Amino acid sequence: MERVFSGSVTKMWRWPVKGLRGETVQSASIDARGMEGDRVLAVFDQGTGKHTWAGAHPRLLGWEAAWPAQCGCADGTGDAPVVYSPSGAAWAADDPGLGAEMGADVGIDAGVALRGGVDGTAGRILVLFASSMRRLEEEVGHAVEIERFRPNMLVETDAEPFAEQFFEPGLPVKIGGGEFTVHKQCERCVLPSWDPFGRERDKAFQRHLITEHANLFGVYLKTADAATVRVGDPVAA
């Protein structure tokens, strides 16, 4: 098979609570369920019982979720992530007082609950290509925070900018010792138009993604096996 690209993993992220900010990691376990600890909880409106998200309540982006160190491993996961309020106060994700505090801050009067029940990863990881990030910044004329796109991985490769928009589903991709395949391109929601903290919205940026790139940015990968991937690992297809 003809080589498509090669390079390495330059940065990785995990987002323990869907809709909140996440954390960078140096390594992560990935299997058919996705990245361990990624989007394992979601925010639910206590009044309606329905899942809510940062597109409807952008102040959720002011909150951050991270797993505390487990057994000395900074990239480990445990029973429940720690959630940090915009003021920096730390809460256990299962603290009974967290729902009212977060609800009051983001404008959900009935409060919220953090729990599972939403397949936040769909058994996949989201990978962005550094060459495409650089070209996108050139197109819009300013720096773009990569966290707007909430990826799991950034790779530096010899692929041309936006080449990933044309990868065929099923394309084999090797990352470290793991075997992955392309699932599909990522069609973006409104979140990239918000800065990573949910303070300001750039609708012109979203329009650019829609008109110039068919609202696609990044590619989803899946794997049927288990692998540990680390920053610095080689990536190739």
Image (cartoon, rainbow, N blue to C red):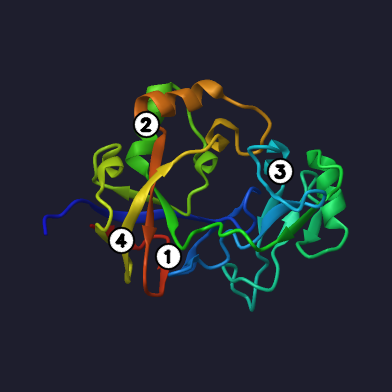
Q: Could you tell whether 128 is left or right of 54 in the image?
A: left
- SS for callout 4: strand
Q: How crowded is mark 4: few (under 14 residues within 10 Å), some or many (20 or more)?
A: some
The residue that disc 1 covers is 230
In the image, residue 53 lies at what x, y percent?
66, 45
**What separation in Å lies between label 3 and label 1 (alpha carbons)?**
29 Å
For marks 2 and 3, give the one nearer the viewer: 2
Q: Sequence-wise, which precedes: disc 2 or disc 3?
A: 3
Identify which residue, 225 or 227, lies in the foreground: 225
**What separation in Å lies between label 3 and label 4 (alpha carbons)?**
32 Å
Mark number, residue 60: 3
Residue sticking out furthest to the left: 2
**What separation in Å lies between label 1 and label 4 (alpha carbons)?**
18 Å
The residue under the point 28% across, 53% down is 169
The residue that disc 2 covers is 214
Q: Could you tell whether 13 is left or right of 52 in the image?
A: left
Residue 202 higher or lower than 42, as above or below: above
The residue under the point 49% across, 27% down is 206
